């Protein structure tokens, strides 16, 4: 199966140019190739082929014009932290071995399945979704397919979902995003990642990291693909067309988000801004000094360590030596945080969101690089905790601000053809998903032209 957009693949199925069974057979074969090593934690080969054959049979027998489902017969992968009926949800760890199997699919998965999707398997991820790098010591680390010459990290935590889409094994990869875990691997692998407002897609049946920040979504090849999957997962379709950018106002924060840019990222971002300006939009540099307040507001632990430790402390206590020490170090920041401190986190965040909404009032969206660096090479990060935590901090820095805002955000590829991927992050405040989607549709061809 060659990398093909969801919309194109669906059209091929509808025309009879291919079959679901053929797509799944090709994907399962490609999943055994070295390039796909460590993408899956579990491949549902027999079940996927059975679903594909049933999809083909339904398409052959369906009366003309019958709606078979928005994802009928399309191969999809699911991150390892979503419940799949009959399987234990592992969340990229091994300490969940022996826990009860899920009695139902997570609602987001059930909606995708009900729309006719063929689920190929569960994809690899950072352990407990607690890293932007995508490294996993238990199941291996998928290789970023964007650079044949260097072994680069895929980004996390939705690493396997991103690589599966980049390799053409699936037309979409379900993922979660707590601090950028959809947008980071999308940016590093040259894909589209959409983190909607948190309330759009139900989080029941998704292994918790941070109930304040977790968001469900998907990684795809195009913006239209992302909206197609989002409509199924959310059951709130964003029926929008590409916006007219002329006269729109875009804010470019000057605090933090442009710090430590690698030259290739700075060049791609500057080119994207120039093209957006040439299209008639007003691109405005703003201080947005409030972004610097997120770190002190997050003391003493931050939502992910505090809520993650609360969710997983019993698992960790069972077998602490079986958890990645780098994950343990971050999770431990939440140990012993008092209710007084936790309520303080909630109150400070609520006040900060109100301030940020005031700053962004009057702008159609906010623009910045998704991450400030190209996908790092894997070997140096394996060799050095210092290098790992520095890269992890930089990868999470920009996208995590949008989770703190409870905003909506796309990462769009903006690198030149053939270059290592760079992501442009276009974001807005809570509830502006439809307007942001129309902007993303307009920006996508402009910044890749």
Image (tube, rainbow, N blue to C red):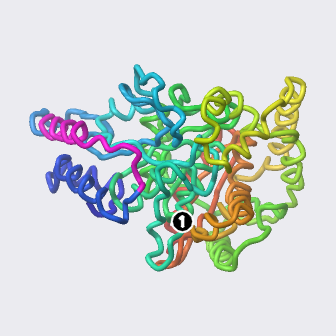
Closest to the observer, 160 or 139:
139
Tell me which residue sits at (26%, 52%) in the image. 28
Up the image or down, 386 lies above or below 430; here it is: below
Foreground: 429 or 87? Answer: 87
The answer, for residue 278, to whether it is visible in the render is no
To which quarter of the image does residue 376 belong? bottom right
Q: Is residue 35 visible?
A: yes
Q: In the figure, is residue 149 to the left or right of 12?
A: right
Residue appearing at x 55%, y 73% in the figure: 415
Residue appearing at x 89%, y 55% in the figure:
289
Look at the magenta stretch and give its main secondary structure. Answer: helix
Task: Count numbered badges in the picture.
Answer: 1
Residue 397 location, x and y as percent?
Answer: 74, 56
Relative to 99, is 382 above or below?
below
Residue 39 belongs to magenta span: yes
Left-right relation of 251 to 424: right
Taking the spot 59% from the left edge, 49% from the top edge, the residue there is: 181
Give how far across and how far down residue 226 sits, in percent.
Answer: 46, 49
Seen from the viewer's position, the closer of residues 410 and 393 is 393
Magenta region:
38-58
Instruction: Pick the residue in front: 311 or 277.
Output: 311
**Residue 240 coordinates in the image, percent (x, y):** 50, 46
Asked whether 32 falls inside the magenta stretch, the response is no
| Quadrant the N terminus occupies | bottom left
Which residue in the rendered view is the most extreme toward the top?
Answer: 103
* In the image: residue 288, left or right of residue 180: right
Image location of residue 229, percent across then percent down: 43, 42
Q: Which residue is mark 1?
A: 413
Structural crowding at the residue carrying mark 1, measured as other residues with C-alpha within 10 Å and reported as few (<14), some (14–19) or many (≥20): many
The extreme left residue here reads 61
Would you place residue 212 above or below residue 271 in this image? above
């Amino acid at each position: 199966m060659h990398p093909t957009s969801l919309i194109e693949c669906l059209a091929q199925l509808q025309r009879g140019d291919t079959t679901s069974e053929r797509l799944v057979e090709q994907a399962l074969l490609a999943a055994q190739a070295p390039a796909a090593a460590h993408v899956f934690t579990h491949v549902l080969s027999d079940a996927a082929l059975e679903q594909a054959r049933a999809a083909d049979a339904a398409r052959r027998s369906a009366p003309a014009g019958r709606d078979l489902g928005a994802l009928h017969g399309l191969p999809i992968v699911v991150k390892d932290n979503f419940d799949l009926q009959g399987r234990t949800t592992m969340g990229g760890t091994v300490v969940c071995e022996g826990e009860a199997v899920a009695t139902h699919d997570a609602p987001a998965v059930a909606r995708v399945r009900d729309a006719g999707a063929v689920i190929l398997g569960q994809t690899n991820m950072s352990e407990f979704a607690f890293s932007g790098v995508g490294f996993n010591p238990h199941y291996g680390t998928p290789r970023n397919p964007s650079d044949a010459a260097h072994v680069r990290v895929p980004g996390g935590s939705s690493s396997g979902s991103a690589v599966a889409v980049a390799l053409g094994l699936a037309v979409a990869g379900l993922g979660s995003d707590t601090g950028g875990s959809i947008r980071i691997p999308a940016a590093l692998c040259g894909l589209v990642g959409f983190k909607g407002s948190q309330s759009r897609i139900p989080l029941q049946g998704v292994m918790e990291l941070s109930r304040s920040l977790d968001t469900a979504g998907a990684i795809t090849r195009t913006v239209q693909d992302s909206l197609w999957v989002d409509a199924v997962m959310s059951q709130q379709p964003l029926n929008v067309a590409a916006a007219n950018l002329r006269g729109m106002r875009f804010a470019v924060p000057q605090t933090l988000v442009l710090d430590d840019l690698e030259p290739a990222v700075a060049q791609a971002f500057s080119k994207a801004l120039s093209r957006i300006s040439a299209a008639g939009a007003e691109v405005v540099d703003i201080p947005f000094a409030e972004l610097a307040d997120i770190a002190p507001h997050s003391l003493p632990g931050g939502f992910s360590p505090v809520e993650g430790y609360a969710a997983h402390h019993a698992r960790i206590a069972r077998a602490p030596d079986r958890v990645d020490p780098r994950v343990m170090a971050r999770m431990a920041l939440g140990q012993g945080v008092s209710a007084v401190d936790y309520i303080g986190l909630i109150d400070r965040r609520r006040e900060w969101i109100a301030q940020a909404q005031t700053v962004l009032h009057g702008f159609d969206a906010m623009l910045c690089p998704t991450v400030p660096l190209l996908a790092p090479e894997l070997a140096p990060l394996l060799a050095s905790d210092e290098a790992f935590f520095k890269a992890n901090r930089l990868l999470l820095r920009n996208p995590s601000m949008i989770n703190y805002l409870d905003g909506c955000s796309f990462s769009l590829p903006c690198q030149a053809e053939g270059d290592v991927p760079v992501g442009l992050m276009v974001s807005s405040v809570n509830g502006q998903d439809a307007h942001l989607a129309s902007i993303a549709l307009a920006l996508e061809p402009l910044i890749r032209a």
